[in-house]
Amino acid sequence: MELRDLPSVDELARGAGDPLAVDAARAVLDRAREEIRAGADPGDLAARLHDELAGARQPRLRRVLNATGVVVHTNLGRAPLAEEAVARVVDAASGYSNLEYDLEDGARGSRQDHLAAILRRLTGAEAALVVNNNAAAVLLALAALAEGRDVVVSRGELIEIGDGFRIPDVLARSGARLVEVGTTNRTRAVDYERAIGPETAVLLRVHQSNFRVVGFEERPRLEEVAAVARRHGLPVVDDLGSGHVSASNKLLLGQEEPTVRESLAAGADLVCFSGDKLLGGPQTGIVLGRAELIERLRRHPLQRALRIDKLSLAALEGTLLLHLEAPERIPVLRTLAQERDTVRMRAERLAAATGGEVEETVGRVGGGALPLAELPSFACAIEESLAAPLRAGEPPVVGVVRDGRLLLDCLTLTDEDADEAAAAIHAARDV
Ligand SMILES: *Cc1c(COP(=O)(O)O)cnc(C)c1O
C-alpha cells in the first residue's frame, strides 16, 4: 500500500456509525502513514479502526494486579477495599441515603455523625472529623488553629510526602507561618520551648513516614513535646501519616509505628492520618482529638471544600467496622499478616504454571509507613521482555524489572490474582 492509496478520515470513519469514529480514524491513518513511510504494510484499516474504537471505549482507570511487593502502593491506588466496605459503597451509591439527614428527628443531620462513635470506640478520642485526605486534614487543622500565626516544627520533620508535595508548602497554604526548630538530625524538647512566643499557635509533629535518620540523631518523645505545649497552653497536632489503629496491626508490624491511641495518650490534642494507608480503607483524612478543637475545624470554611464524599464515607464505615470485628478481613492487614510459606507456595505455583523461577525478595509496607521494614517475600521471575506486554494486558500486571528479569512479587498478589497473572503471562507470550 502507498500513501495515496489511504482513504480519507471521513471515508474510513463513515462505515463505523460511531461518534468516536472520526478521532479513531485519524489516529489509525496517522499510524498507517508512518508505517508506509517506514516501508511497512499497515494491513486491514477497518479492523484497526475497530480495535481503536474498542480501546477508546475501555475505561482508563482499571483494576491492575500489583506484583511489586509494595503493599500500600500510592501509584497503584494504595489500599484495596474489603468486600464488606465495597458492599457499603454499592448500598449507599445505589439510592438515596441519610448522608445529612437525622432519621430520628426527621431533620437535617451531619455527615460527620455517622463515624464519630466508631472512631471514638477504636481510638478513645473525644471527637472526630473526616475529610478528603490526610493532606486536607493537616491543612484544615493548621488553617483552623494557626492562620496568621506561628507553627513550630522540627527541621527533622519537614518531609516531602511524594510527587513533590511538601509539608512546609501545605503549612504555608494554611496561612500559618512555619517556625523551624532543631536540626535535621537532632531536635530536643527545649528547642520547641525556646521557639515559643506570643505568635505561637500550634506545636506540630510530623511522622517521619518515608525515611529514617540513623546514627547521631535525637528526637523528643511526643510526651515531652506535649509537656512543653501544656506549659504554654498550646495544642499539639500530630500528623501520624499512616494511622495505625488496630492492636492486631501493632502485633504485625512491631513497635516502630505509633498507634493513634498511643499518640492521643502521649498528649497529642489532634491526630491526623490517612484512610488508605495502614487503615486499609478509602482515600480519606481523619482528624481525632479534643472536642473543642475538632469543633473549630468543623466550623472553618475550608471544611466545606475539603469534606469527605458519601462513597468514601460508606467505604470508611465498612472498613472501621471490620477493624472492630474482623481486622483480618481487611486486605492490607491480611497481606501483611501472611505466613512466609504461603507467599512462597504462591510463587512456586505461579512459577510452575509459567516456567518461571522462584526468587526470594523483600516486600515493603509502602505508603510512607515503616520505611525500614523488610517483609520476607518470594517472586516468580520471568523474561524481562514481558514487562511491557503484561502492563498492556487485561488485567494489566505490574511487576519489577531487576537484573534483566521481570519479578512478579507474590506478597501483594492473592491466590486468585496469581492465577490471573499466569493466564496473562500465557496471553502475553502468545502475541
Ligand atoms: C501520607 C502522608 C500525608 C498525606 O496523606 P494523604 O492521605 O496522601 O493526603 C501527610 N503526612 C504524612 C506524614 C504522611 O505520611
Image: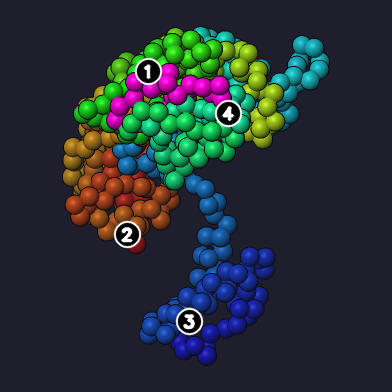
Instruction: Give the spatial CA distance, label 2 vs label 1.
Output: 63 Å
Q: Which residue is tagged 3?
A: 33
Viewer-nearest residue: 364 or 59: 364
Q: Secondary structure beneath disc 1?
A: helix
Instruction: Give the spatial CA distance, label 4 vs label 3.
Output: 62 Å
In the figure, is residue 174 to the left or right of 122?
right
Q: Nearer the viewer, mark 3 or mark 2?
A: 3
273 over 158 or under it: above or below: above
Q: Which residue is tagged 1?
A: 189
Of pointers 3 and 2, the one earlier in the residue sequence: 3
205 over 231 or under it: above or below: below
- The quarter in which the N terminus is drawn is bottom left
- Callout 2 amino acid: Asp
- Is the Cβ of the residue at disc 4 closer than 8 Å to that at disc 2? no
Q: Which residues are magenta?
A: 185-206
Q: Residue at x 40, y 12 (%)?
A: 223
In the figure, is residue 218 to the left or right of 154?
left
Q: Nearer the viewer, mark 3 or mark 1?
A: 1
Q: Secondary structure beneath disc 3?
A: helix
- Callout 4 amino acid: Arg
Numbered tag placed on residue 430 in the rendering: 2
